[in-house]
Image: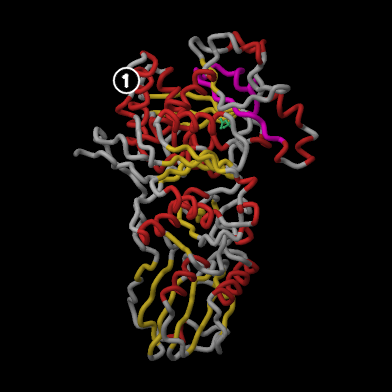
C-alpha cells in the first residue's frame, strides 16, 4: 500500500511542520493538480470523495482568500464542509478552544480543522490536546491547519507564495533573490518566509522597511541562522539607489492601526517609504515580478493600481494558487495522497537533556578554603556558586533573590556577592548547610534561572560532587513561568488551560506555541 496516508492527521501550525522535502512534495503535487485541472482532465486521484470526512472552517478573524479558497478546496474534495459560526456559538460564552473543538470533533470524528485566530499558537495547542483526546477515544487524530494566527505565522499562505515563486522561476530552486517590503513587523506572511524560503538552496533576502516597520530580530536572526544572506534598507528609494536589485518583490499591507498614536502621526512618511512609484519603473531588472498576499488597501495600496495590467503583476496568479495548494494540503492531511513521497520527514528532534554537566573535582578542596569570605563554612550541604559571574553587583543580587524565590529556599542558609579569582569580577553564592539533595525539577529550575552556575555537593567539609548547569533544552509546566505575549494561546489570562512550554534556541527560550523569544530572565513571573 506504499505510503498512502502518511500525512493523515498531521497538523500544519507553522511552516516547519512540513519538512523541506515535504514542502517540495506539496509543490510538485500542486503543479500536477493545476496542470490537470487547467487542461480539464480527471483530478480524481487528489479527491477525498468521502461524505463522512469533515472540513471545519473556524475563522475568528476576517478573511476572503484563505477562507474562500479552503471552502472551495473542501467542495472540490466532495467532503462535508462545516463553517463554524463563532458569533452565535457558546464560544461567545467564554468557552475554551479545547472544549469547543472537542465537541466539533465528537460530532464529525473524521475531520480536519482550519483556523484563523487572533490568538497565537492555537493549532499547536489543539494538535496536542486533541491528540490526547483522540487516543483516549481510540479514533484517528484530527489535523489542524493554521490559516493565520495573530502576528505569528500564516503557513498555507507561505506555501502558495513559494509555489508561485517556483512557478515564476520555472521550477529552478537553486537560488532566489527576493525583496520583502511593507509592514515586516506585523506581517505574519513575512515571518513565515523565515523558514519557507529554505526550499531554495541559496537565498538572498533584502528587507526594505523603515525601523518602525522592521522585521523583528527573532525572524532576522533566524534567517541568518538558516544561511540566508540578509541586507537591510529603510525605503524602496534607498534600495533602488544601489545596483543589486532582486527580481522577486514581496509586498505586504501596512497594519498601522495596530501601532500607537506616535506611529500614526508618521503614517504618511512610513507608507511612502514602502510604496512603489512610477518613477521607479526603469530601475527594475528584466523579468521582475511583484507579489502580495492581499488584501491591498484600496486608498493607500503599496502596489498602486497602475501596475495591475503590467507584466509585474504576479499577485493575481498567486492568489489563485491558493486554491490549488490548499486542495493538496487537504489531500495530504486528509490521507488521500502520500504514497509517492520518498523524501525525509524532519520533524524537530528534541535535543538531549544535556544541561547538567559533571565537573570533575580535581582536588578534595577543604570547604573552609573555598567558601569562607562572609559565608559560614558548610560541613555538609549544597553550595550554589558562580551565580551571574561577571555581571553587575546589582544583577547578581537580583539573580540570588530570583533563585531563592523560585526554588523556595526558605531554610537556614546564607548568601552573598563575592570576588571571583579575578578581583575585578564578582559572582553570587548561596550556601545551604544540611540540605543534602535537590529534586530534579528544582535543578532544572536552577539551570533555567541561573545558567552557568555550579551546584556543589559538600561532604565532610569538601566538595564531593560538582555540576555546571546550562539552559535546559525544554522547560515546561512550572507555575513560575509563562509566555508574556498576551495573544499567545498559553498566556495565563487567556484561561485556555494550555501549559507553558519553552524550548531553548541558542541563548534564548522560545515559546512552543507563539514562538516569542525570551532571555532566560524574562520567562519568570516576577
Ligand atoms: N492573504 C490572506 O490571508 O488573505 P485573507 O485575509 O483575505 O484570507
Question: Which part of the image, by quadrant, shows the N terminus?
Answer: top left
Q: Is residue 235 magenta?
A: yes
In the picture, residue 480 is in which quadrant? bottom right
Quick check: 329 left or right of 501?
A: left
For the point 36% across and 63% down, the residue is 353
What residue would you read off at disc 1? 42
Position above or below: 294 against 215: above
Task: Locate the C terminus by quadrant.
Answer: bottom right
> Is residue 303 in view?
yes
Vertical order, 114 against 89 (above or below): above
Q: Position of residue 176 (x, y in %)?
A: 43, 24
Q: Position of residue 301 (x, y in %)?
A: 67, 22
Check the image and name the residue furthest to the front: 51
Taking the image in four quarters, ligand 1 sits in the one at: top right
Q: Position of residue 36 (x, y in %)?
A: 34, 18
The x and y percentages for residue 374 are 58, 84
- On whether residue 203 falls in the magenta region, the answer is no
- Give, as a single range, the part of the protein colored magenta: 234-256
Residue at the image point whose x is 39% and y is 86% from the top: 462
Amino acid at each position: 500500500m506504499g505510503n498512502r496516508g502518511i500525512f493523515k492527521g498531521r497538523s500544519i501550525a507553522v511552516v516547519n511542520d512540513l519538512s523541506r522535502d515535504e514542502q517540495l512534495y506539496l509543490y510538485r503535487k500542486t503543479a500536477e493538480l493545476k496542470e490537470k485541472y487547467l487542461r480539464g482532465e480527471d483530478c480524481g486521484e487528489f479527491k477525498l470523495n468521502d461524505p463522512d470526512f469533515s472540513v471545519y472552517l473556524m475563522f475568528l478573524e476576517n478573511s476572503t482568500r484563505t477562507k474562500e479558497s479552503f471552502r472551495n478546496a473542501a467542495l472540490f474534495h466532495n467532503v462535508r464542509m462545516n463553517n463554524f459560526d463563532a458569533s452565535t456559538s457558546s464560544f461567545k460564552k467564554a468557552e475554551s478552544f479545547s472544549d469547543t473543538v472537542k465537541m466539533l470533533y465528537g460530532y464529525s470524528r473524521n475531520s480536519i480543522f482550519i483556523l484563523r485566530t487572533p490568538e497565537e499558537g492555537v493549532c499547536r495547542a489543539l494538535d496536542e490536546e486533541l491528540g490526547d483526546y483522540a487516543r483516549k477515544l481510540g479514533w484517528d487524530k484530527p489535523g489542524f491547519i493554521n490559516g493565520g494566527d495573530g502576528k505569528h505565522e500564516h503557513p498555507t499562505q507561505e506555501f502558495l507564495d513559494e509555489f508561485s515563486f517556483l512557478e515564476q522561476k520555472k521550477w529552478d530552486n537553486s537560488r532566489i533573490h527576493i525583496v520583502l517590503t511593507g509592514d515586516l513587523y506585523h506581517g505574519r506572511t513575512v515571518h513565515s518566509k523565515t523558514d519557507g524560503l529554505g526550499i531554495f538552496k541559496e537565498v538572498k533576502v533584502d528587507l526594505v522597511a523603515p525601523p518602525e516597520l522592521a522585521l523583528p530580530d527573532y525572524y532576522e536572526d533566524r534567517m541568518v541562522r538558516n544561511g540566508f544572506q540578509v541586507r537591510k534598507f529603510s525605503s524602496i528609494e534607498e534600495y533602488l539607489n544601489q545596483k543589486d536589485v532582486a527580481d522577486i518583490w514581496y509586498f505586504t499591507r501596512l497594519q498601522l492601526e495596530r501601532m500607537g498614536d506616535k506611529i500614526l502621526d508618521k503614517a504618511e512618511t512610513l507608507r511612502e517609504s514602502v510604496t512603489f512609484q512610477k518613477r521607479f519603473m526603469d530601475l527594475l531588472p528584466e523579468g521582475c515580478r511583484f507579489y502580495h498576499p492581499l488584501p491591498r488597501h484600496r486608498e493607500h495600496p503599496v502596489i498602486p493600481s497602475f501596475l495591475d495590467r503590467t507584466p509585474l503583476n504576479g499577485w493575481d496568479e498567486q492568489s489563485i494558487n491558493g486554491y490549488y495548494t490548499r486542495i493538496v494540503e487537504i489531500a495530504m492531511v486528509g490521507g488521500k495522497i502520500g504514497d509517492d513521497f520518498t523524501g525525509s520527514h524532519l520533524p524537530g528532534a528534541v535535543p538531549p537533556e544535556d544541561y547538567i554537566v559533571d565537573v570533575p573535582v580535581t582536588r578534595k578542596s577543604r570547604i573552609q578554603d573555598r567558601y569562607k569570605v562572609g559565608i559560614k563554612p558548610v560541613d555538609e550541604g549544597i553550595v550554589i556558586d558562580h551565580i551571574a559571574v561577571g555581571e553587575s553587583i546589582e544583577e547578581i543580587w537580583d539573580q540570588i533573590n530570583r533563585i531563592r524565590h523560585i526554588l523556595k529556599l526558605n531554610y537556614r542558609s546564607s548568601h552573598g556577592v563575592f570576588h571571583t579569582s579575578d578581583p575585578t569580577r564578582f559572582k553570587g553564592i548561596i550556601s545551604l548547610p544540611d540540605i543534602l539533595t535537590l529534586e530534579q525539577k528544582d535543578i532544572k529550575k536552577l539551570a533555567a534561572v541561573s545558567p552557568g552556575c555550579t551546584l556543589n555537593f559538600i561532604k565532610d567539609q569538601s566538595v564531593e560532587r560538582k555540576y555546571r548547569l546550562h539552559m535546559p533544552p525544554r522547560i515546561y509546566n512550572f507555575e513560575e513561568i509563562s509566555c508574556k505575549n498576551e495573544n499567545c494561546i498559553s498566556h495565563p489570562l487567556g484561561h485556555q488551560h494550555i501549559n507553558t512550554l519553552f524550548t531553548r534556541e541558542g541563548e534564548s527560550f522560545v515559546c512552543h506555541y507563539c514562538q516569542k523569544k525570551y532571555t532566560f530572565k524574562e520567562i519568570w513571573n516576577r
